[in-house]
Amino acid sequence: MNLWKNMAEMTMSATEVAERDDTKTSGSRNPLTLNRDFASSFLVVAVGCACLYLIIQDEYIVSPQSVANVAILWVASIGSGYACQAVGVPPLLGSLIAGILLQNIVDDFGISPRFGEVVETVGLCIILLISSTEIDINAVAKAGGISLRLTFLPGLVEAFTCAAASYWIFSMPPAFALSLGFILAAVSPAVVVPGCTHLQKLGFGVDKGIPSLLMAACALDDIVAISGFTIAIGIAMDNHDNLALSAFMHGPVAIFIGVVSGCISGVILAATRYCPSDWQRTAIAIELGLLMTYGYKRAGFESGAVATLMMGTIARLVWQQKPVIEYTQCSGAEFLNKVGLDVNVIWDIAVRPLLFGSIGAAFDLSVMPKESVFKSCAIVIIGLFIRLPTAFMSAYGKDLSNTERLFVAFAWSPKATVQAALCSLPLTMIKKNYSGSDNIDELVDFGTQIKSTSILAIIITAPIGLLSLAFLGPMLLSKESQKETNPAAANEAMSCTRRLTSSRH
């Protein structure tokens, strides 16, 4: 109890701090308040400088042409994103298509690989930070075993199926094949969450909690996929001959380091007494995520993704404790929603257009053999055909009918955000770690195949998931009667829809 009481003291709101600590005598402020303001500003600046140092360690060549290309890409991505949103298509798909068209239609158009690497790393950090703010442990526990089955079974089965298909079709080494498999296994919250909140607002599947079930399991599904990718790519990039030691260091050790650092960062983020303003908490959340992502990357570990996911989850758990709520007069969800709203604005304006636009701009059809495109499509389709029945069987329980389980299977298929953030990482790491290797050309081909397959997975599965949520939902789910509809639940769903669909998606 004393631990949570001390934590509550650190998580006091700005109003509480002013009421309890500010003694205004002779127009002066309490020295403790001044010291706290200085400490919070120093923390924001110090962590920001550390992130900047880690990001710019490599040399970057900036030319007027490259700046102009980035500006054109950003404007085109924003415009195509809004155009797609107007017809009910996720904006990220429009940004991806804009990048592909610019690369393959406009002469001499190209984005610097270094710039693309920075955008992809920052994009991954932002995606994981948003996902961590949406993980509701209580909702997962309430959903029971079906939520855990949906979290683990479809993704793992698809990952190993796609890995086997990649090994057979591309003759890809097992570690690289598993890396591709886990990239393809992640479900996209950018497609699933808005569609589910819309169905929930209309009353479809609400009586059995199907939309809430899918939203609760969505972020956890990404954790499983990213953790598997972390282990596989760590083994693939390790040049040591001891495979068991490599698997241990890049598996349990890397995940353990990520969990521990994520817990520490979550406590720091929750200490709102030392970061009383909303913008300070948002800045610290983004900076801590970038610091862990780049810091572990420089150290040779891929623990940053797990750490960033844990950070928001731990902050939510701290803010939800009763002593903390009594001291702050504010629920943990309110604190975290404010951070999520700010991060969503950054995602919608800058990160999403540049991330998906740069991924599309890297998809150059002129240098990609046609047979590789067909092979990549085959891998995606094989994984999808295995994932659908696995998700259908995983949805057994909770008194779901066969038609409702069929909807869950199709709604659990779209790819987008995680694939865009991770698809270029293997190719970048190959060029850095194997630059002097005799088989560098072959390894670069594997990295290129991973990237192109991931992009094609977005193009193929995102519309399938979108159409499933939009059309199969009303067809296959029962609608709650108007008399039974809970007004509080409806208002909560509408608020959630506005928050999640207005920016990131």
Image (cartoon, rainbow, N blue to C red):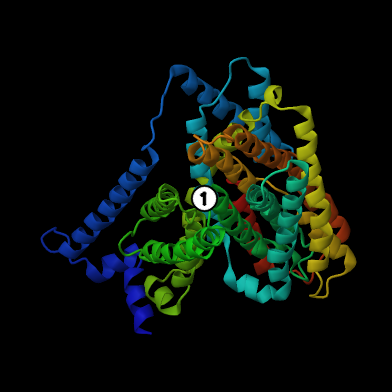
Vertical placement of residue 399 versus 427, above or below: below
Does residue 477 appear in the picture of this structure?
A: no
- Nearest to the observer: residue 108 or residue 479: 108
Q: Quadrant of residue 83?
A: top right
Residue appearing at x 66%, y 76% in the figure: 142
Q: Quadrant of the C terminus?
A: top right
Does residue 62 appear in the picture of this structure?
A: yes
Tell me the kind of residue under disc 1: Asp
- Nearest to the observer: residue 201 or residue 208: 208
Q: Secondary structure at mark 1?
A: loop
Vertical placement of residue 153 versus 434, above or below: below
Q: Residues within 10 Å of mark 1 (few under 14, many from 20)?
A: some
x%, y% of residue 278?
A: 39, 55
Is 219 situated left or right of 459 in this image? left
x%, y% of residue 314?
A: 47, 67
Vertical placement of residue 370 versus 106, above or below: below
Q: Which residue is mark 1?
A: 238
